[in-house]
Image: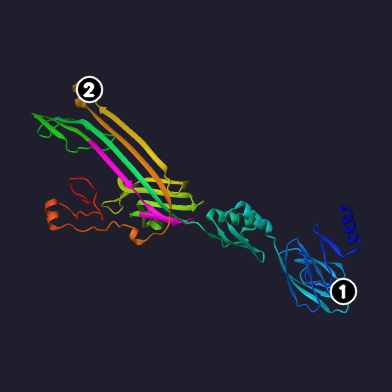
Amino acid sequence: MRISGLILLLFLFAFGDISFLGGSVLAMDSNSQVSQKGTRSFGKNVNPNLIRLSVNKSIIVDLPKTVRDVLVSDPSKADAVMRTSRRAYIIGVEVGQTNIFFFDEKGNQIIALELVVERDFSPLRGLYRRLLPGSSIFVESLNDSLILTGSVKDSVSASKAVQIAARFIDNEEKVINMLTIKGRQQVFLKVVIAEVQRSAAKQLGVEWSSVLGSKDNGPSFGFHSEPPFSVSGQRLFKQGFKNKYVSGNFTLENLIQALERNDLLRTLAEPTLTAISGEDASFLAGGEFPIPVSQDNGKVSIEFKPFGVSLGFTPVVLSEGRISLKIQTEVSEVTGKNAFSIASSFGGDGITIRGLRVRRAKTTVELPSGGSLVIAGLIEEKSKHTMNGIPGIKNVPVIGELFRSRDFQNDETEMLVLVTPYLAKPASRKDFILPTDNLAASSDHDANVLGRLNRIYGTKGPGSSGTYKGNVGFIVQ
C-alpha cells in the first residue's frame, strides 16, 4: 500500500496541477470556488477582493482566464509571480497596502485585488501564552504599528508584554498599549518613624576676679579667669553663686557655676498614604519657613523651606501579593542649634536664619502586602568631656578644684523607620472612624473642678465583663 501511494503521488506530481510553496503541497481545480489554506480561486465577474497577507508569506491565486499582463501598484509592498498563465503567486514584501491588477491578451481587466500586508503575530501570541500565563492578550496591526488589547494580572505583566512587543517589531514607539489590569492596584503605605533622644550635661567651674589698686584711681593690677565650657558652648547657669571679699585696696570675687541638666526627646510620626500602582504620591504635615536668598544687584529674595513630617512613595504591584516601593520619608524641625546670623549693612539688628534638624530615609524595597520592613535605623552615642584650669594649681588635691572647670556632655539617639504596605480596596464610609467622632467640650463642672478639656466618651456596644475601678473610655488632656 505504501509503494502504491508513492507511485500515485509521483504520477500526480508529473502530470497533475500541483504546486509547492513553503514546504506544503497545494492542489487547485481551476473551476472550484473554495480552496485550501493558502490558495485563492476567483470565478468570472468577481468584484475586487480584499486579501490580508503576512510579511514574507505568500498565497496562490487561480484565475478564470489566461493572463497576459500583471500590474502591481506598489512593488515595494508585494510581488506577483505568474506560475502558469492562470496561476499567480502573491508574496508579501513589506507592511502596507497595494493593488494588483490582472489583464487578458486583449487588455481587459480580469480581476483586481486589494492587498493588505501585515506582520505575522503568531510567534508573538505563542510567546505571550508561554511567558505570561494567566493573561489574555490580543495582538492587532494598524499599518506599521502594533496594538495590544486584552487583560493581564498586574502592571509588571503589562510592562513585560510591551517590552516583548517592542523587541518583536524593533520599535517601542510603535507599540500601543491598551491592556487592562485584573488585580487591585491601589497601595496603602504606613510608615512609622520612632525616635528617642537622651542627653546629659554637667558643668562645674569657679570664676575668679581680683583687683589690687588705690582708691583714688591710681595704678591697679587685676586678675580674671572665666571657665570656657567649650563642650556646651555656653553656661547652663548664667548667674551662679557669687562671693565677694574686700580688704582695703584689694577686692576678690568668685563665681561658682555648677549645674546638671538631663533632656529627653521622644518623636513618633506615623504618616500614611494611598496611591495607584506606578503613580507618585506625596504627603507633608508641617509648614515652611522663610530663607533670604541673594540676587543680582544686591537684591534679596525670600524662599520658603518646608519642614515637618513628609512621605513620598511610588508603588508598583509586581503580583497580587508582592509590592515594589520607592520610598522617601523625612521628619524635620526648625532649630536654633545650627542657626547663623547675617549682619545688616544699614545698622541695627541683622538677620538670624535658623537651621533644620532632619531625619531622612530614601530607598527602594520589595515587600508582600501586610509585611513590614525596617528601612532605616540609627543608634548613636556621643560623649564629650573637657577640663580647664590654671597650670600647676589645678593639679593640687582639694584646693585645685577651685581653680579648674569641668564640662561634660553625653548624647544618645535611637531611631527606627518601619514601613508596611497594603493592597487597598474601597470601603463603606461607615467603616471609618474620624478623630472628631464623639468629641465634645466638657461641661463647666468638669472643666473647673476636674480640669478636663473634653468629656469622657466610650465606644458603643456591650461593656466588658468583670470589675474595674476608674474611668472607662477615652480622654485627651
- Above or below 42: residue 130: above
Compare residues 292 and 158 and report the one nearer the observer.
Answer: 158
Q: Where does residue 284 sit, x and y in percent of width and height?
A: 36, 54
Q: Where does residue 278 sit, x and y in percent of width and height?
A: 49, 55
Relative to residue 453, is residue 357 drawn left or right? right
* CA–CA distance in space, label 1 to label 2: 129 Å
- Above or below 248: residue 15: below
Q: Main secondary structure of the magenta part?
A: strand
Is any part of residue 224 visible from this angle?
no
For the view shown, which residue lies furthest in the left direction? 248
From the image, state whether disc 1 or disc 2 is nearer to you: 1
* Quadrant occupied by the N terminus: bottom right
What's drawn in magenta, residue-wise? 261-284
Write the residue at 27% across / 40% down: 264
For the view shown, which residue lies furthest in the front direction? 1
Residue occupied by mark 1: 66
Q: How many discs mark residues in the rendered view?
A: 2
Write the residue at 31% across / 32% down: 384
For badge 2, the amino acid type reads Ile
Residue occupied by mark 2: 393
